[in-house]
Amino acid sequence: MHMTVEEALSVYPLSEGRLVAGAAGKGRIVKSVNVMDAPDIWDWIKEGEMLLTTGYLIKDDPEGGAGLLRQLDRRGSSGLGIKPGRFWPEIPAELIAAADELGFPLIELPYAYTFSDQMNGLYRAEMQRSTNALQAALEKQKQLLRFAMQSDPIRHLLDEIAGVVGYPLAVVDRSGEMIYNSSRAEAAELLQGWPWTAGRHPWTKGAGWHCYRIPLEADGGAGADIQGFACFVTEEPFFTTLEESLFRQAAELIAYQLEARHAAAGSAARSYEALVRSYLEGGIAASELAAHSGAAGAAAMAGAYVPVLTDAGSAPDEAGWEARLERARLEYARHPELGRSGALHVRLQEGLLSLFPEPAAGSGLEAGLAACAASLRKASGGAARIVVGSRRTGEAALAGAWAELREALRTARRWGVAEAVIPARRMELAALFEDVPGSRIAAYCDRVLEGLLRKEPEYSQEMLRTLEVYLEQDGQLAETAKKLYIHRNTASYRLERISELLGVDLKKTDDLLRLKLAFQLRGMAARAVDPAPAAPAAKSGVRAPAAPASKAVDPAPAAPAAKSGVRAHAAPASKAVDPALAAPAAKSGVRAHAAPASKAVDPVPAAVRSASRK
């Protein structure tokens, strides 16, 4: 049973009675009806239950009857019907006052009808109501089935579905965009708490309305790919079980239609993706690619765009590699901002190439990529990288963008860059010095920073850190002090002392450039690795996973130790080193020592490496 007290009072023969008090509660829901025949009835009362009584148990204690109303109200009872005439000529004033105070419906039952007459009348009415609802639901299901066979525009289809279910409808796609809304609630209100998780907290509450949302799951509710959510809006804080069932059928229909449309769009996009792949592999010219500018997916290159290359990490086989690229594409598609940017995604041997158009990507591109990279790294065990290229325009610029991304990714692997999101421009310097021997890089760092390196290690490290932060903050003294958690005067004193020890002027661009270069080269040399070559690409054009590179090292020798005063260490026999390494160490008068077998040779002096780690 599910009707309000007001509706119950319209059902014969209860309609012959009257509501004598508690009119404020006539909207309470009656879920069942029972007869009160025990003094401790409140211990057995159920929420929504209406009680009928002759008043025998409270006939001599009207004040106790008022207490009974309070107990019933606390237990969630929907109302109390009293049949006067046998023990009370009329309902006592104490009960009426208590019922009005509580807003608890108090009904004077008609004397001429038994309790069973009134209960049967309510249950018959509920049965008729349920039968009518089932017939209406069956008719609505037939209409929904007819809609499933149509290919009308999606908005017209959603208008029809909203009309059939009888409630306002809103549909949100998987990127968080409101693609349809027939309710009076604003999209921003309906989308509160986005992104949503299927199966948790399906209700959203607003000013005078409630929204019940159902995930739009592809593949018949398998849950593998959620297309979005259907939101059914009502002024009441509940729906009946029958209505919820109807809503779920409507949601399945909407999911089916969205999936069909996405599949059609995806097929067209994949055709254009194949053209882009062919262009980047030299199969077609830029003019031929531009001739398909009206194809699905081509809009990403209609104006300016930002190219992005996602390395999803290695996989044991081609199927695993494909799955990782698809995971990356879905991460972008499901992101609240990146998902509706209109980006084009192309799977290539090196990874997933994504073109994010401007200004659709907007200022949120960096934050969005960082969020997706964190998720991808979690899934791949920390191996994923995202390289962000320079802003480009048009199809003709795509080849240059692709070359930039590939080179940046290769260099990032070569130098062991740990960041998840890497601007390609940051790799330009590393690529420039890639063929310079490690000994020359270390010697340059030694020479530029010699004035600090020859000091006591603790003092040297503190000064090196201060200078490094100063350069990172683009010469801003206040920001340097803030970053180091020291007073501005302390930072100023340290920088003056650094200028004296290094013989530089920190206000001159040339000196700042030399110092900046020394720190960047030192950091890159400390991380340098020599990755193993990638396995041959699969015939399908998708890259086979690369072999592990964790044990490979740069055979470049360590820097001469004579000038820096830092003792040189010989590498173990199992590692490749420069045979000239021992000679400079001998000149310094310091005996060379063998490094532990488990350590790889670092081309940067020990003091420099220690300072960089601090």
Image (cartoon, helix red, strand yellow):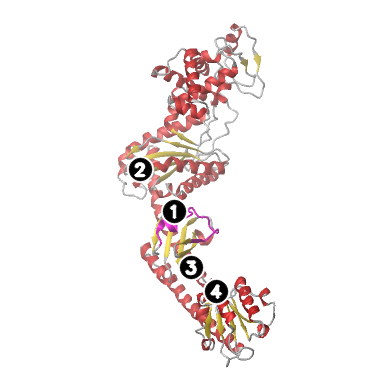
Q: Secondary structure at mark 2?
A: loop
Q: Earlier in the sequence, mark 4 or mark 2?
A: 4
Q: Earlier in the sequence, mark 2 or mark 3?
A: 3
Q: Amino acid at mark 1?
A: Gly
Marks 2/1: CA distance? 19 Å
Q: Which residues are magenta?
A: 185-204
Question: Where is mark 1, residue-wise?
Answer: 176
Q: Secondary structure at mark 3?
A: helix
Q: Amino acid at mark 3?
A: Phe
Marks 1/4: CA distance? 46 Å
Q: Whole-percent x and y of residue 365?
A: 42, 42
Question: Where is mark 3, residue-wise?
Answer: 247
Q: Secondary structure at mark 4?
A: helix
Image quadrant where residue 427 sits: top left
Above-or-below relation of 425 to 21: above
| Tag 3 and tag 4, C-beta contact below 8 Å | no
Magenta run includes residue 202? yes
Crowd rating for badge 1 (residues with CA inside 10 Å; few <14, some 14–19, many 20+): many
Q: Amino acid at mark 4?
A: Glu
Marks 3/4: CA distance? 39 Å
Front: mark 1 or 4? 4
Most common secondary structure along the magenta stretch: loop
Label of residue 101 in the image: 4
